[in-house]
Image (tube, rainbow, N blue to C red):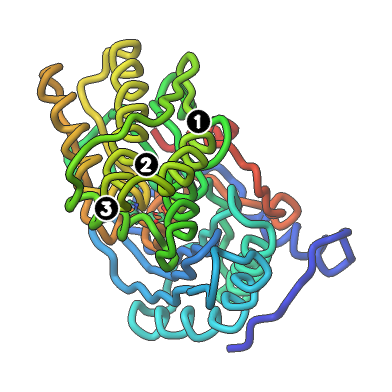
Amino acid sequence: MSLLYVKITEKPLALKICDTYFRNYCHGVRENHMSKILGLEGTAWNLSAAIVDENEVIAETTATYKPATGGIHPREAAQHHANNVSDVVMKTLEKGGRNVNAVAFSQGPGLGPCLRTVATAARALALTLDVPLIGVNHCIAHVEVGIWRTAARDPVTLYVSGANSQVLAYRKGRYRVFGETLDIGIGNALDKFGRFAGLAHPGGPKVEELAKKAARYIPLPYTVKGMDFSFSGLTTAAQESLKKNDLPDVCHSFQETAFAMLVEVTERAVAHTEKKEVLLAGGVGANTRLQEMLRIMCEDRGIRFYVPEKRFMGDNGAMIAYLGLLMYRAGYRTALSDSRVNPNYRPDDAEVVWR
Ligand code: AMP
Ligand code: MG
């Protein structure tokens, strides 16, 4: 199978014909039979394809972009995805079978060049396999895969990843954003600080390890404004602090300060919504100190706390396939003319048709 590369800038005749083809699927009928969905993720550093059904991940193949120096370079990451997407998809289809009901892909948010590369592959794949296309919101995929893989049902979710940091909860047809970062995501903040301190990308896990060796806490700027938080001032202050203090102490203090901000806002969202569950999602959720702080807060309030397996926390193809499956079963389809990527796609922009 060869993947054709279609650049969606204006709408040529071929795409109008494809639109008619895709609209044939847009009938809004709920599917009750067992479905199998192929999902493609590639919003930033991780290119991943997976096939899931209602019960399990049938196949998953991943190719990770590792920058030679510095952080993620969007054009290089997109080139990595373009070089590897055929291989990743073919391996997944060989293992999971070609008889999928739809192709789901991350429509946003994410890095524009990466999103466009993977969306182009998803369009070509849907046409080749003769199945509908489903564009999914990447943030919501993190939440839904967490609900799928734990006993959570209707949680307040703390979603913490490289580019995004949000407190989300479902209310009246949407995942509402109760609080979010005013500047950079907590993962990017940890990675940026790590690079400054001479740690290789990604810095987050290395900061966690160094923090365990700390001898003391150093006060750093704590910024919660209303229900929102901010990490760039904290990152600069932590970098400055390295001039006078030991790296493990600064790593520990950075984590304690940033995670306390996240836990404070999550707790206030719980108090406001009166929900009885907290779910942790996103790559930074692998941090055991953040998990511990959230667990203490939840125990104190007498509510349940859920953390999915680590493989479902960072960006992965299974989460895209699973949200695609929920949307497919609810009758949702993405016409080719609506499949343009949106690097700023907010979770509260997406209508929740599957709950
Ligand atoms: P995601 O964008 O959801 O794939 O998450 C990637 C981010 O998670 C990167 O910024 C990593 O540094 C961060 N990360 C991964 N593991 C850890 C950890 N144990 N502690 C803190 N951050 C982490
Ligand atoms: Mg993510």
Q: Identify the element where label 3 is drawn.
A: helix
Residue 327 in the image: state x and y as whole percent.
46, 46
Mark 1 or mark 3: whose residue is earlier in sequence: 3
Residue nearer the viewer, 281 or 180 = 180
Residue 144 in the image: state x and y as whole percent.
36, 43
The disc placed on residue 144 is none
Q: Which residue is mark 1?
A: 230
Q: Which residue is mark 3?
A: 208
Mark 3 CB lies closer than 8 A to ligand 1: yes
Horizontal side, residue 5 vs residue 172: left or right? right
The disc placed on residue 143 is 2
Asked whether the beta carbons under mark 1 and mark 2 sit within 8 Å of each other, the answer is no
Of the residues tagged 2 and 3, which is closer to the observer? Answer: 3
Asked whether the beta carbons under mark 1 and mark 3 sit within 8 Å of each other, the answer is no
When asked about the image quadrant of residue 92, the answer is bottom left
Q: Which quadrant is the C terminus positioned in? A: top left
**What separation in Å lies between label 1 and label 3 (alpha carbons)?**
20 Å
Q: Is residue 316 above or below residue 97?
A: above
Residue type for callout 3: Glu
**What separation in Å lies between label 1 and label 2 (alpha carbons)?**
22 Å
Residue type for callout 2: Val
